Amino acid sequence: MSAEAVAAPIRRAPGRRLFVHQLRAEQRVFWRSREAAFFIFLFPLLLYVLLGSVYSGRIYGVPAAQALLAGLIGYGCANTSFAGLAIQLVARRESAILKRLRATPLPAATYVAALLFSTLIVFVLQTIALFLLGSVLYGTPFPSAAGSLAVAVVLGSAVFAALGVALASFIRSAEGSSAVVNFILLPMAFLTGSFGPTRHYPPYLRAIGDVLPLKYLIDLVDAIYLHGHSVWTRPEDVAVLAAWGLAGLVIALRRFRWEPRER
């Protein structure tokens, strides 16, 4: 996506149309990338199929397929809004796409808003696909508190997007971005119960998991989906997630750069 390609329609598209135009562009770029479509959108679905075939019985007092579904919604959020966004931003920054975009009439706020909203759309579609897959393969129910789950999805996406932008500001090269991101994401997913119960982990591993933001998103989704609670019955989870999101936002605002880093 070149700066010139973005600039031409932008000059003719004031206000809200700018956002819609850029949002469409972000969606086209995402879905045309086979790597992004697989590793960001399809990979959590594949993991659900594999884990659902391994686990049986009950987890946390509910059928295993339901508990795994809740955990993989959390993992999908981190994979999409944190890992995918961080890798994408580093790649665009280091290839000077962000620098060229700053030279177009597209306002920075509009670009960032379109990018974040596009990320949210991908995660929402992924969440819907997980529920459909679970219903077809394992007979899992759809959420009874759909409104609260929607709030949790938006909150989780916003928090991990802020953390993803913050992380992107520390990564120096596009070549190393995937390794850095997965070095953080995969251990976090294992330690917080995305892939199964953690009650048999050593105490020190559970202690590490207890401070990570993904644990609180998974706990929130568990409460809403598995037990039918409202999002507001878990104020501690919402507060911890908000604190992580605020920390990510502060770091992102202080460190984010549009130009490639000097090597």
Image (spheres, grey):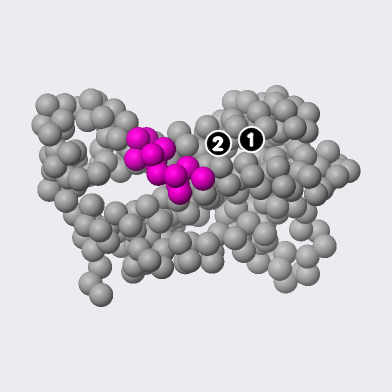
- Residue 160 pos. (x, y %): 48, 50
Residue for badge 1: 130
Q: Report the front residue among 82 and 29.
A: 29
Look at the image and say whether residue 117 sits in the magenta stretch: no
Which residues are the magenta region?
A: 27-38
Number of dots carrying numbers: 2
Q: Tell me which residue sits at (59%, 60%) in the image.
A: 186
Question: Where is 131 relative to 197, above or below?
Answer: above
Look at the image and say whether residue 29 sits in the magenta stretch: yes
Question: Is there a contact, CB below 8 Å, between mark 2 and mark 1?
Answer: yes
Q: Amino acid at mark 2?
A: Gln
- In whole angstroms, how far apart are the C-alphas of marks 2 and 1? 6 Å
> What secondary structure is the magenta-colored segment mainly?
helix
Q: Is residue 219 left or right of residue 115?
A: right
Query: Can you see residue 18?
Result: yes
Residue lying furthest right = 57
- Residue 221 pos. (x, y %): 66, 40
Q: Amino acid at mark 1?
A: Leu
Label 2 crowd bin: few (<14), some (14–19), many (20+), radius 10 Å: many
> What secondary structure is found at the residue carrying circle 2?
helix
The answer to which quarter of the image holds residue 93 is: bottom left
- Residue 159 pos. (x, y %): 48, 48
Label 1 crowd bin: few (<14), some (14–19), many (20+), radius 10 Å: many
> What secondary structure is found at the residue carrying circle 1?
helix
The answer to which quarter of the image holds residue 257 is: bottom left
Residue for badge 2: 126
